[in-house]
Amino acid sequence: MQSTRTLTDKIFLVLKGLGMGAANKVPGVSGGVVAFVAGFYEEFIYSLQKFNGKAFKLLINGRFQSFFRYINGRFICLLFLGMIISYFSVSKLLDYLIIHYELYVWSVFFGMIIGSIYYLSKDFDGWCTKAYVSLFIGIIIGISISFLDPAKENDHLLFVLFCGMISVSGMTLPGFSGSFILILLGNYVLLLVDSVNALYDTFFDVFTGNFSFLDNPERIRMLKILGVFTLGSVAGLITFSHILNYVLKHYRNITLSLLMGFIIGSLGVVWPWKETMYKINSSGNFILDSRGEKIIENYERFIPQLNNETFIAIGFVIIGILTVLSLEWYGQKTRKIKS
């Protein structure tokens, strides 16, 4: 699938990586949905499953150009460049927006998921009994996950490795939110906030010539945790991509209907009108995380009253839907030009 890409294609691919990175960090939103809607999901899975024995042989034999072409390197590098930029920029902006404009942010994501359901279903012509059963199972799993209670934080390195492997599923399984899985596992703040902030602070210290962090055991601990989490994520990403490539090749209709079910089920997670429920100890006080912030237990969803705030939120839902339709329109236009 290695192809010549124009400068516009490269810029848009980085932007898509930005979208995937931002979506992966938001609980309830799947980066895989961005890949699906933007029309590069199958190329993404195809490229990841190219990290195999043949690629390893090319690498250790010093055939770097052949290795780069074999793994569709230009596509992977541009996409992951966008994700990395996102984690240190867009995701910070999202953190701010969720704190100050939570309802409207969730409304946009809710609209985007509705749009992605339309995108998936409109061209799907493989409906049969097995596909309907698969769709139903996906919906049940997606809804069930949204109502599970989070566990306690656990920084054991083997558990952190497991978190990395399972959370990265959000990039390969549309509708299966990796960040929400981390909330359920109790390690969202530890792995996507504290450890990332530690890495950000370390980069800043190194850039300014300050190496005092080497004598900071807490900083070293967080960097070690992030390293193990990253290792687990890479291993999980490659493993899931091989599995998905196989099932898409042999059970395409069942797999797509199951993924569609995941996405439909995830609507409950991103329902905009909800009240955050925080963990409380036996004394009735909020339980705080390592940063002194309240720990989320789950969300209590409700039907909104018809007022100005609700109408504005509905407007943002429509914006989310139109965003997805615009991406679809762009994808179709690009495919027509290339063909």
Image (spheres, rainbow, N blue to C red):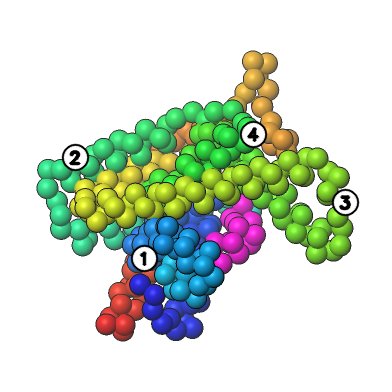
Name the residue at 64% across, 20% down.
Answer: 281
Inspect this view and state whether residue 129 appears: yes
Mark 1 or mark 4, earlier in chain: 1
For badge 4, the amino acid type reads: Asp
Camera-nearest residue between 98 and 25: 25
Distance from the alpha carbon under mark 1 to that under mark 4: 34 Å
Q: Bin the neighbour count of mark 1 within 10 Å (Cα to Cα): few under 14, some 14-19, many 20 and up.
A: some
Direction from residue 197 to residue 263 in the image, left or right = left
Name the residue at 35% across, 72% down.
Answer: 1
For badge 3, the amino acid type reads: Ser
Find numbered disc 2 in the image and state the secondary structure of the residue it sits on: helix
For badge 2, the amino acid type reads: Val
Mark number displayed over residue 133 = 2
Inspect this view and state whether residue 321 appears: no
Q: Quadrant of residue 204?
A: bottom right
Mark 4 or mark 3, earlier in chain: 4
Q: Position of residue 250 (x, y in %)?
A: 21, 53
| Residue bounds of the magenta highlight | 77-95
Mark number displayed over residue 155 = 4
Question: Quick check: 332 above or below 298?
Answer: below
Nearer the camera: disc 1 or disc 2: 1
For the C terminus, the image quarter is: bottom left
